[in-house]
Amino acid sequence: MLSRTASHLYWMARYIERAETTARLLQVGARNALLPDIGGGFRNDWEAILQATGSLHAFRDKYGETKQRNIETFMFFDTENPSSVASCLAMARENARVVRTALTSQVWDGLNGAYQELQEFHRTERSRMQLTDLTEWTMNACALARGGIASTQLRNDGYYFMGLGFSIERGDNTARLLDVKYYVLLPSLSYVGSGLDQTQWVTLLRSMSAHRAFNWTYRGEITAAKIAHFVILNTKFPRSLLNSVQMTVDSLDHLSRGYGQPSRAQSVARALLAELAEAQVEDIFDEGLHEFLTRFTRQNAEIAGTIQDTYLQGEPA
Amino acid sequence: MTQDLSGTFNEMMNGADIRAAYSNLERWHNEMPADLRSLKQHEAENLFRRVGITFAVYGEGGDPERLIPFDMFPRVFTAAEWRRLDRGIRQRAAALNAFLADVYDRREIIRAGRIPEHLVTRNAAFEKAVVGVRPPRNVWSHIVGIDIVRTGRDQFYVLEDNCRTPSGVSYMLQNREIMMRMFPQLFVDNRIAPVDGYAALLKKTLASVAPQKCEGEPNVVILTPGQFNSAYYEHSFLADLMGVELVEGQDLFVEGDFVWMKTTEGPQKVDVIYRRIDDAFLDPLCFRADSMLGVPGLMNVYRSGGVSICSAPGAGVADDKAIYTFVPEMVRFYLGEAPILENVPTWQCAKPDECQYVLEHLDELVVKEVHGSGGYGMLVGPKADRAQIDAFHAKITERPENYIAQPTLALSTCPTFVEEGIAPRHVDLRPYCLVGETIELVPGGLTRVALKEGSLVVNSSQGGGVKDTWVLAD
């Protein structure tokens, strides 16, 4: 397969995943904003969300004040914001269009259909669109593309490059979502364990469509340790960091088996997987949640860089 | 530009009678309820948009992905009509290739005094870089698109030749697919020659001109300028049908004596490049240094026989409008045959006496720029106002060698769906002739139709549409 084709498939998947995460973040923000503002040490929750997507500065430069309506515009519609839902879906669809023939018509229809509907949204009056409708629409659009891939794409190398796009992006995004929690709580650790703390954790779980899954898995009281274990180390939770790295390793294994050649990306990814498999929640809190997440994001990016070098640039294997 | 339709040939009619070839279609159209018709028209548009067959126009505002209007009323040729066209098209494609092989080699036709030397060697499309190069099988133009118009029962004229990278063949194929899907009964009731063998023939043609150095199954690729090119859909469509990689310049590199493509498993040798980019962009080391679309060093590999490029660099010199006049001469000179297809009578403004005639009759002629394309930069005398005619008078006087002129032809019409039913609209035809080890031509081509009443301009960039083109079996 052409390296460029593989690269387009990989990025298509990354943008689908990213669109979904942005929508999830918007959901978290909207719910958090409904909580009572205690003032004092709290930062604006919306700022935490912008910080998590790394776009707080870009937002401030363009809109100034962090008002919900501006945030919605910025994170959903604004095509100048590279991680807005509109930008991500347009990029996913553009990557797909270039390699149209490497995709089944079901996958293409899913992405192209979402893109056409998005153009309709741009023409619709804003007051007629609810934020929850928009975020749900996004999840549905992404699920359709994902479902098309799962049920119709050939299991050839292209499929596993898409798989890598999804898992690399997912690991990165879960770490960012969890980090939002850090930014919100940073000013005062005294809130840990309080009722407010509890509500925010629940909101976080909801943003990953995992609230009920969590309850089934852990039962009883929600504690920071349990949540951290669930989101970082749980082997059954599909968005956990451990699981996203596992998915990356699986895709890489399939690729090197198909090509009959082991890759350096495999060993880098396996090293991270081994660390997560051994890790204890206590160690993570000792290191500091934010520090741990920052380190994970860097290591995950290193795997991505190695994939890039190994497969996507067409250099000799 | 409109014109009086009296005196033009309506391809459906023979005097007041419906011609036999169209009788089934006449009945089909009469029996079709109006609501079904608009339903089908919508269905067709949805199919085109869903498959992504759009014509990309960037930089003009509006939706960059436009549909070329599809007219559901097919255009029909009888077996006898096609036999003659078929022979004429193959003959012309062979002569054009013989001409190219000659002008980059011994230039016999110039020595024989049949074509003035300066028209060839001072032509902008003449590539000095390939003089003396002999591509595999000495084929230069592998896909020849010949634009043909009809003015009467038996009068066909070649309007122009396209020896570089004629586009539109995906519409020929998709128009047929969509018609078969929407109106299967038509294909039961009429014996219509299939065109879907085109992709296999194209692949066979390209593989047949692989370099001698190539061992085993040749690796054929299509080289595209990328997704922003107006014909990108066609490039990816053809790559998919042939099962070959669609590459951009950035996917290829030169190392040693060969061209390689970058794959997830490392470099893979490329043997035949069906390029859909212009000569000037092929190789920044040989042509335009600022080209980001090409492959540095490609021309060196080409000249040393490491890779085949289709069409061969330099092939454009054969389809230049100034050379066009001489194509019938090429047929006689190289093939020793009488030309089966005629040229439209053409005045060369480069010749003083012909230029004089053109300047005196601007109000009745069509004037074209020698290097122009797509219906831009032309004057249609009968439809032009005084100011436009004066402007062209000045331009021609200043640079006569840049212009040719032709009479306004009474282009034939074909029934076409309009608001109130059907009405005659002007059409042309572009068949795609494949030249490799053998010369191949599928029975059909792309019919373009000027949708505006009376309009003669069929170019998709200027509001033309397309039709399915049928060749009936005997």
Image (cartoon, coloured by chain):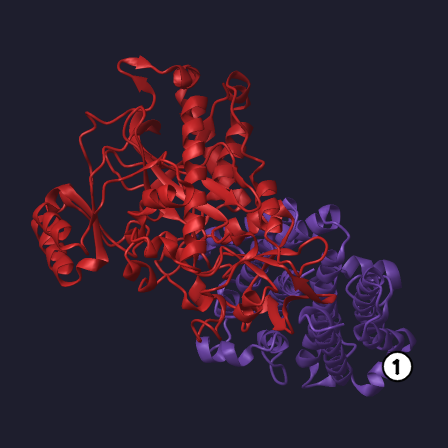
Chain colours: A purple, B red
Looking at the image, residue A273 sits to the left or right of residue B434; the answer is right
Residue A312 sits in quarter: bottom right
The subunit letter for the residue under badge 1 reads A
Query: Please, which residue is most extreme toward the right here?
Result: A278
In the rendering, at what x and y percent does residue B243 appear? 65, 49
User: Which residue position is annotated with label 1?
Assistant: A282
Looking at the image, residue A105 sits to the left or right of residue B333; the answer is right
Q: Going 66% across and 78% down the picture, which residue do you hit? A: A184
Residue B60 sits in quarter: bottom left
Residue B466, placed above or below residue B405: above
Q: Going 49% across and 32% down the picture, which residue do you hit? A: B443
Can residue B78 be seen here?
no
Can residue A255 be seen here?
yes
Q: Going 53% across and 22% down the picture, which residue do you hit? A: B187
Name the residue nearer the viewer: A270 or A146. A270
Looking at the image, residue A58 sits to the left or right of residue B373; the answer is right
Q: Residues within 10 Å of mark 1 (few under 14, many from 20)?
A: few
Name the residue nearer the viewer: A163 or B240. B240
Label 1 sits on what residue type?
Glu
Across the whole image, how many numbered discs are drawn on residues? 1
Q: Secondary structure at mark 1?
A: helix
In the rendering, at what x and y percent does residue B116 appear? 28, 56
